[in-house]
Image (spheres, grey):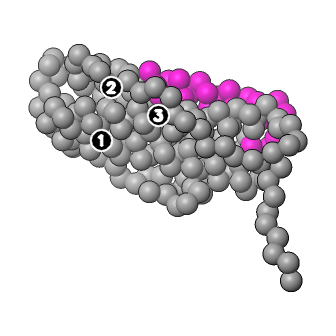
Amino acid sequence: MPTTTKKQNSQQPRSKFYELLQGQVHNEFHASQQYTALAVWFDNEDLPELAKFFYAQAVEERNHAMALVQYMMDTDHHVTIPSTGEVRNEFTSAKELAELALEQEKEVTSDIKTLTKAARSEDDFLGEQFMQWFLQEQVEEVATMSTLVNVFERANGNLFEVERFVHKHLQSDDADDDMPEVAGGKL
């Protein structure tokens, strides 16, 4: 009996939604790499709670990228794993890193909204439904990073107060239990 493999059609033109989805895979991997750079900066500055928080954020963004990959495979679309592009590694203050994280999450939110609109405009009900989890996730991500920026401002340079806040209030609780399936399994 001949062995057959699932063939993903890379020749047929994809919808705008799937083109944007492929682009979002890049964005999520880039966010993961940027969060890794932030974590390493905090780690190097002997700020272990902030480092731990951003290492976890990096893994979360990787999982988001792989959930997009899984969805594309499940819907029989060709997936290309992209390079991540340039990552910023140089900073002058700890608060600057939190501000970068907030801006990054705002950009991702805009991207997710664009993806959802594209799915809706193409009557891709499954795609639109898939994006709902990501929309809710972005509300949480922007709120968390906004809070972190506010804590940096209120701590007025006292990084130990920021560390204490992160330890007490921003540790991961694995709330992503309802997350879409992740290719290769969630880390």
Q: Amino acid at mark 2?
A: Asn
Q: Nearer the viewer, mark 3 or mark 2?
A: 2
Q: Which residue is mark 2?
A: 89
Q: Nearer the viewer, mark 1 or mark 3?
A: 3
Residue 76 against residue 10 in the figure, above or below: below
The quadrant holding residue 112 is: top right
In the rendered structure, the answer to whether residue 53 lies left or right of residue 25 reads left
Q: Residue at x 30, y 28 (%)?
A: 148
The quadrant holding residue 42 is: top left
Q: Which residue is mark 1?
A: 53
Circle 2 SS class: loop
Circle 3 SS class: helix
Query: Which numbered disc, 1 or 3, marks the residue that appears first in the sequence?
Result: 3
The answer to whether one can see residue 7 in this image is yes
The spot of residue 56 in percent (x, y) is: 35, 46
Q: Residue at x 82, y 70 (%)?
A: 4
- Does the stretch in magenta take in 186? no
User: Where does the magenta region start and end?
Assistant: 103-127
Q: Amino acid at mark 3?
A: Ala
Residue 17 against residue 98 in the figure, above or below: below
Q: Main secondary structure of the magenta part?
A: helix
The spot of residue 99 in percent (x, y) is: 35, 20
* Label 3 to label 2: alpha-carbon separation: 13 Å
- Callout 1 crowding tier (Cα within 10 Å): few <14, some 14–19, many ≥20: many
Query: Which numbered disc, 1 or 2, marks the residue that appears first in the sequence?
Result: 1
The answer to whether one can see residue 50 in this image is no
Q: Which residue is mark 3?
A: 31
Q: Nearer the viewer, residue 132 or 67?
A: 67
